[in-house]
Image (tube, rainbow, N blue to C red):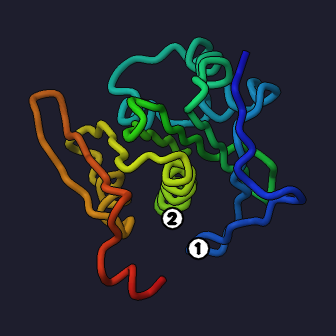
């Protein structure tokens, strides 16, 4: 049974306009999304799947896991293109402890570089903060500079540690950087 939290107010979802002018709707993943999510995963390049999952993937098992295996404190989101209704991104936050959660993202190749990762991180951070989480962590492959940049540009202090397996990014939600705090 999947756990789905509706993080939006009641009423229709407002589209989010990305930096290239395209628009998406971000919403929680639902149990009925399995076929659309599988189509999304099948449309992502092998290289993007490798960067996200650090190796070979069984798309059927992965799709099922995304839809059915959320814990009570986890959140899974999808972004749908307003123009087509197709899922173009998936993001999730997985509880590690009462104050820490791991985040992960996958954006289809055609939608990368438009600012969608930043939008998804913002939604996950907002949910995490409202749940009492103060630190987000992510495992990133060393060559995935684009994802590291999303974290570094988030407005939160970011710590980066390298180990033999990759890079661990730690995002401190309790403090915003001074420049963004002034702008808020």
Can you say whether 78 is above or below 146 in the image? above
In the image, what residue occupies the spot 74% across and 24% down? 34
- The image shows residue 152 at horizontal and vertical percentages of 29, 62
- The image shows residue 77 at horizontal and vertical percentages of 63, 42
In the image, what residue occupies the spot 50% across and 48% down? 128
- Mark toward the start of the polypeptide (1 vs 2): 1
Front residue of 82/153: it is 153
- The image shows residue 76 at horizontal and vertical percentages of 61, 37
- Residue 74 seen anywhere in this rendered image of the structure: yes
Res. 39 mark? none
Can you say whether 161 is above or below 23 in the image? above
In the image, what residue occupies the spot 23% across and 44% down? 143
Residue marked by disc 1 = 20
State the CA–CA distance, disc 1 to disc 2. 9 Å
Q: Disc 1 on helix, strand or loop? A: loop
Left or right, 90 with reference to 138: right
Q: Disc 2 on helix, strand or loop? A: loop
Res. 115 mark? 2
Q: Are marks 1 and 2 in contact (CB under 8 Å)?
A: yes
- The image shows residue 97 at horizontal and vertical percentages of 39, 31
């Amino acid at each position: 049974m999947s756990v789905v939290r509706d993080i939006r107010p009641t009423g229709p979802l407002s589209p989010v306009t990305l930096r290239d002018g395209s628009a998406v709707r971000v919403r929680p993943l639902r149990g009925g999304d399995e076929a659309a999510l599988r189509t999304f995963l099948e449309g992502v390049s092998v290289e993007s799947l490798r960067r996200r999952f650090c190796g070979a993937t069984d798309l059927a098992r992965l799709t099922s896991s995304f839809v059915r295996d959320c814990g009570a404190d986890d959140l899974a989101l999808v972004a749908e293109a307003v123009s087509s209704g197709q899922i173009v991104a998936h993001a999730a936050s997985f509880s590690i402890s009462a104050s820490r959660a791991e985040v992960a993202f996958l954006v289809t190749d055609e939608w990368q570089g438009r600012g969608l990762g930043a939008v998804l991180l913002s939604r996950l951070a907002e949910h995490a903060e409202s749940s009492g989480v103060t630190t987000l962590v992510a495992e990133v492959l060393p060559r995935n500079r684009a994802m590291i940049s999303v974290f570094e540009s988030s407005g939160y202090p970011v710590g980066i540690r390298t180990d033999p397996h990759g890079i661990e990014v730690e995002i401190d939600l309790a403090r915003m950087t001074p420049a963004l705090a002034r702008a808020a």
